Image (cartoon, rainbow, N blue to C red):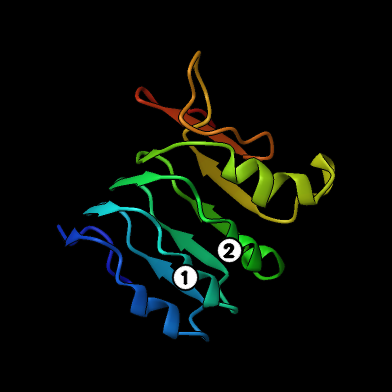
Amino acid sequence: IGLGDNDLTGTIPTEIGNLGQLQSMEISQNRLNGTIPPELANLSSLQYAFIYDNQLTGAIPAELSSWNDTLVFFQLFDNNFTGTGLEEIFCEKYPVDEFPFSMQADCVGPDPEVLCSCCNTCCNASGCGW
């Protein structure tokens, strides 16, 4: 599903979680707000998740650990997430040198929004370091 850069507003519809065979979700560069619905964990074939550059908030739902077996690329920077969800859901599942997918989040600076020791790229308000 490709809905990036469409100036969409509102929350992420929980019904997207009904698209169990969805392999790519591009909802970045919009004005989506609220939290990531835990129902997205039902996307059991998801390989690519692009949700960066929105106004999303809150913790990353623990249910997203279901993505561990299929995810290849996950971009969620430039939002307002909080907490240790990425660390607990994804990073603690694998040794650092065996992390199976690429992840980018707001995890750098003196007061990072999220903790993510396994992120390939960490971002902050100034941008992302590659």
Residue occupying image coordinates x 32% and y 62%: 27
In depth, the one of 35 and 79 nearer the eye is: 35
Question: Quick check: 10 left or right of 45?
Answer: left
Q: Which quarter shows the N terminus?
A: bottom left
SS label for mark 1: helix
Instruction: Estimate the x, y position of residue 26 in percent, counting from the top left.
Output: 37, 65
Are discs 1 and 2 less than 8 Å apart at CB?
yes
In depth, the one of 91 and 124 nearer the eye is: 91
> Residue type at mark 1?
Leu
Instruction: Estimate the x, y position of residue 85 in percent, counting from the top left.
Output: 58, 45
Instruction: Estimate the x, y position of residue 103 in percent, counting from the top left.
Output: 58, 47
> Residue type at mark 2?
Glu
Q: Is residue 103 above or below residue 84?
A: below
The label on residue 24 is none
Q: Residues within 10 Å of mark 2 (few under 14, many from 20)?
A: some
Residue occupying image coordinates x 22% and y 58%: 5
Find residue 30 and report its image quarter: bottom left
SS label for mark 2: helix
Q: Which quarter shows the C terminus?
A: top right
Residue occupying image coordinates x 85% and y 44%: 95
Instruction: Estimate the x, y position of residue 113 in percent, counting from the top left.
Output: 46, 30
Residue occupying image coordinates x 36% and y 53%: 35
CA–CA distance between discs 1 and 2? 8 Å
Question: Quick check: 66 left or right of 58?
Answer: right
Q: Is residue 77 above or below residue 24?
A: above
Which residue is the site of mark 2? Answer: 63
The label on residue 40 is 1
Q: Residues within 10 Å of mark 1 (few under 14, many from 20)?
A: many
- Compare marks 1 and 2 and give the one earlier in the sequence: 1
Total numbered labels placed on residues in the image: 2
